[in-house]
Image (spheres, grey):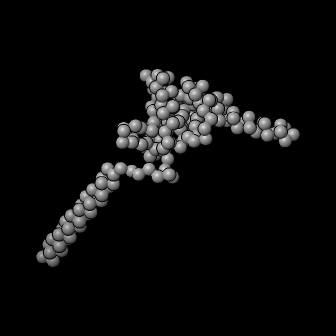
Amino acid sequence: MWFKLSLAKSRRSFKSNAKSTRRRFIRESSKNLLMANRNQIPTSNSALIAMIADEDTVVGFLLAGVGNVDLRRKTNYLIVDSKTTVKQVEDAFKEFTTREDIAVILISQYVANMIRFLVDSYNKPVPAILEIPSKDHPYDPAHDSILSRVKYLFSAESVASGRR
């Protein structure tokens, strides 16, 4: 008898705890959905990272939270595969370099080689362009435009100061 009474009491308390947990979860989920549907107000200290790379690289960064879709359905990434044309890559690069909300552009080095003339001619500090390796194409420092600029600056400084 005592055991049956204790079991019935524990069942009631379990059901009430489950109900309150379920209610709390629904309340928190609805708050999160409301916050997700709000329009974000851009501030002067918020900026995005853009990506132009192969699917695996872009998906990895998207899982890390880099992805963004604005109100006009513009994304901050371009997935480059065998069907992507050089014109599409050029257009994405030009768009990302002119957008005010992008601070850094990560571009796979093999994709940067496709539009090397644009990457080498770009000389603004923001957005900064960083060439990264991809899974299928290893990093080659000889093709990195930023590294070559840094080497040039250091060699010019060493010549100007008389050191070598």
For this rendering, which residue is in front, 130 or 87? 87
What residue appears at the point 60 percent right and 32 percent down from the top-left corner? 122
In this rendering, the answer to whether 34 lies above or below 138 is: below
Q: Residue furthest bottom?
A: 2
Say left or right for 82 vs 14: right
On the image, the x and y values in percent for residue 108 come to 54, 32
On the image, the x and y values in percent for residue 19 come to 21, 64
Give the quarter of the image for residue 131.
top right
What residue appears at the point 45 percent right and 24 percent down from the top-left corner? 84
On the image, the x and y values in percent for residue 72 come to 36, 38
Q: Which residue lies furthest to the left in this view?
A: 1
For this rendering, which residue is in front, 50 or 20? 50
For this rendering, which residue is in front, 45 or 158? 45
Residue 56 in sight: no
Say left or right for 32 vs 139: left
Q: Which residue lies furthest to the right in this view?
A: 162
Say left or right for 15 vs 69: left
What residue appears at the point 20 percent right and 68 percent down from the top-left corner? 16
Q: Quadrant of the N terminus?
A: bottom left
Say left or right for 148 vs 27: right
In this rendering, the answer to whether 141 lies above or below 26 is: above
In this rendering, the answer to whether 14 lies above or below 125 is: below
On the image, the x and y values in percent for residue 28 come to 30, 59
Q: Quadrant of the C terminus?
A: top right
What residue appears at the point 51 percent right and 31 percent down from the top-left corner? 94
Residue 115 in sight: yes
In this rendering, the answer to whether 115 lies above or below 107 is: above
User: How many numbered discs sit on the rendered protein?
Assistant: 0
Give the quarter of the image for residue 120.
top right
